[in-house]
Image (cartoon, rainbow, N blue to C red):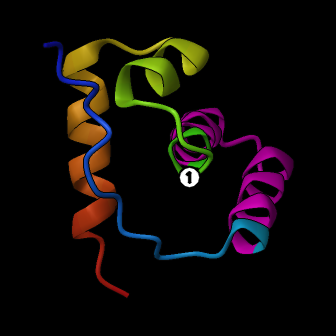
Amino acid sequence: MKNNQRGLLVKHLSSDELDRAIADAQKADETHLVRRLCYVKNLYAGDTREEAGDRVGISPSTTRRWAQAWNEVLY
């Protein structure tokens, strides 16, 4: 059976806060940050890491790193 890689994602931000962060990053022309936040938004919506990564154009190894980095963020 294939692992769907959903895993647990820490929801540091609400969906509304995440949308605002994406909008702010777009206004600041922070393309890399926009991609990361959109990846997280896709995970929030229920995508697997692979699905979310495909939507923003990143490799499977990057999806794992980005999810781990998001989970380890300390506010």
Residue 33 on image: x %, y %: 56, 44
Badge 1 element? helix
Residue drawn at 17 percent across, 13 percent down: 2
Magenta stretch containing residue 24, yes or no? yes
Side of 53 relative to 21 (left or right): left
Foreground pick, 31 / 71 = 71
Q: What residue type is disc 1 on?
A: Tyr
Q: Is residue 31 above or below residue 56?
A: below
On-image quarter of the C terminus: bottom left
Side of 69 relative to 57 (left or right): left
Outermost residue to the left: 1
Residue drawn at 37 percent across, 30 percent down: 49
Residue 68 on image: x %, y %: 21, 51
Residue drawn at 66 percent across, 42 percent down: 30
How many callouts does the rendering have? 1
Q: Is residue 4 above or below residue 30?
A: above
Residue 64 on image: x %, y %: 22, 34
Side of 71 relative to 24 (left or right): left
Residue drawn at 46 percent across, 71 percent down: 11
Foreground pick, 29 / 74 = 74
Question: Which region of the structure is painted magenta?
Answer: 17-40
Please name the residue that numbered disc 1 is placed on. 44
Side of 15 relative to 13 (left or right): right
On-image quarter of the N terminus: top left
Residue 24 on image: x %, y %: 80, 60
Foreground pick, 1 / 65 = 1
